[in-house]
Image (cartoon, rainbow, N blue to C red):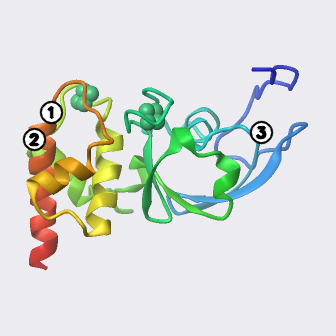
Amino acid sequence: MADLDLPARQGFTPDAPSAALPGEIPLTLTINGERRELHVRPWTTLLDLLREDLHLYGTKKGCDHGQCGACTVLVDGQRINSCLALAVSKDGCEVTTVEGLAAPDGALHPMQEAFIEHDAFQCGYCTPGQICSAVGLVQEGHARTPDEIREQMSGNICRCGAYTNIVDAIEDVLAKETAK
Ligand code: FES
Ligand code: FES
């Protein structure tokens, strides 16, 4: 890529407002409940913004091509592959990463609890994307059966093969949501 004429982001502090470098575009996002005034290069993906600029390393880069789901986050409540979204295209949006799912008092999200209870991971690399995707799936309200969960989670790959327990965890949360 021919972007290397621009100064490097040395000394960038993730919690401070970002000063614009040449060619950067202003961008406002609410990330995990916190409004952020940022500046990004036009080609920066939401995934790279989260990880490289904001140091939110929970969101993982697997394929970087929309094939694995490791980078799944919620944007205005909808699950997306953040590697496929340009950050500037989400100006004004609310972004939730796995770091933002727990309650302010630290209580884990029910989906996080269910993943622990059902042992729904091994190495854990896919897990933040699986959990964000599962939270999106429950909010969508379309999946009811294990087959429907499998179908609608098919964009999230687990190389450790923890699928059976992942489906069990999601089924558990769905059942509790339905019982409310
Ligand atoms: S890193 Fe985004 S789908 Fe694989
Ligand atoms: S737990 Fe290892 S890739 Fe899913």
Which residue ends up furthest to the right in the rendered image? Answer: 22
Q: What is the C-alpha distance between the residues marked 3 and 2?
A: 40 Å
Q: Circle 2 is placed at which residue position?
A: 165
The answer to whether any part of residue 119 appears in the image is: no
Left or right of 159, for residue 6: right
Q: Circle 1 is placed at which residue position?
A: 162
State the mark number for residue 41. Answer: 3
**Crowd around label 2: few <14 · some 14–19 · many ≥20 (10 Å):** some
> From what the image shows, is residue 148 above or below residue 54?
below
Do residues under tags 3 and 1 come within 8 Å of each other at their CB atoms? no
Task: Give the residue at x 10% y 41%.
Answer: 165
**Crowd around label 3: few <14 · some 14–19 · many ≥20 (10 Å):** many
Looking at the rendering, in which quadrant would you find the C terminus? bottom left
- Say which element carries label 1: loop
Query: Which of the marked residues, 3 or 1, is nearer the chain's N terminus?
Result: 3
Q: Position of residue 45 (x, y in %)?
A: 62, 40
Task: Give the residue at x 20% y 62%.
Answer: 143
Amino acid beneath label 2: Asn
Do residues under tags 1 and 2 come within 8 Å of each other at their CB atoms? yes
Task: Give the residue at x 55% y 41%.
Answer: 84
